[in-house]
Amino acid sequence: NAGVTQTPKFRILKIGQSMTLQCAQDMNHNYMYWYRQDPGMGLKLIYYSVGAGITDKGEVPNGYNVSRSTTEDFPLRLELAAPSQTSVYFCASSYGGHMNTEAFFGQGTRLTVV
Amino acid sequence: AQTVTQSQPEMSVQEAETVTLSCTYDTSESDYYLFWYKQPPSRQMILVIRQEAYKQQNATENRFSVNFQKAAKSFSLKISDSQLGDAAMYFCAYRSPSGGSNYKLTFGKGTLLTVNP
C-alpha cells in the first residue's frame, strides 16, 4: 500500500514549456486534489475531482488542466509554464461523503520555472 | 468562504517544554472538521490531530491535544514534552462536511516551530 505517489519530485522548466505532474493513489479514494504551496503561504487548491470522469476548478486553476480517467490517477498538466507557477505541488486524496476522514498527501513536486 | 488564520508565523520551544500554536477560523457552518497537519523538512504532510465540530470533547493524540472553542472559532494545538522531531511547519486546516469542493481543505499560512535542545 503505497498511499499517494507523485512524480517527479523535482523539475526545472523553461518559460513556455509544458509538463505533466503525475499522481496515483492505491487507496480507492474517490476524491483527489491538487494543491500548490508558495513560500510563506498555506496550500491553495488548484483542481479537484470527486470521481473518475469528474473534475472541477479550485481557487487557483489558471494555467493548469487535469483529467481523471481512472479512480487511481489524477495528472496535472501545465501548459506554457510561467515563473508564477514556480511552487511546490501536492496531490492528495480522501474518501468523500459525510465522514471525518483525513486527506492523504503525496510527497510533493518542487517545480521551478526559469 | 471559510478562512483559516494562524497568527504566529514562527514559534520556538525548549525540548521537553510545552508549546501552544494558535488557529482561528471563520465559517457560517455549524458542522465541520478541523485538522492540524505537520510538514517537516521532507515536505511530507502528516496528520497530527483532528476534531469534529459537533464533539465538545477536545481531541488528544499522545503528546498532542487541542483546545477547541467553537463559539470563539478557535482551534489551538498544544504540544507537550516537546521533542526535536516535533520541529516542523504546522498547518491548521478546515473542512466542511458538505459535498463538492467543500470537501477540500482550507489551510492557514502555517506556523514554523523550532525546538531548541
Image: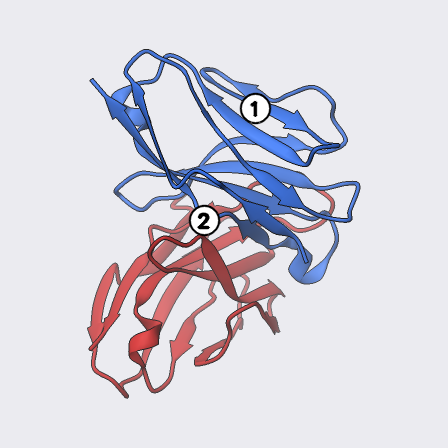
Chain colours: A red, B blue
Q: Residue at x 44, y 52 (%)?
A: A42
User: Can residue B7 be seen in the rendering of this structure?
Assistant: yes
A107 on left or right of B109: left
The residue at which mark 1 appears reads as B66
Is B67 on the left or on the right of B29, as rendered? left
Q: Amino acid at mark 2?
A: Lys
For image coordinates 36% across by 54% down, the residue present is: A5
Q: For marks 1 and 2, give the CA distance.
A: 18 Å
Q: Is residue B73 left or right of residue A17?
A: right
> Is B2 in front, or is A52?
B2
Give how far across and how far down residue B99 sits, in percent: 73, 57
Residue B46 location, quadrant: top left
- Which of label 1 and label 2 is nearer to you? 2
Chain for numbered disc 2: B
Which residue in the protein does label 2 denote?
B109
Q: Earlier in the sequence, mark 1 or mark 2?
A: 1
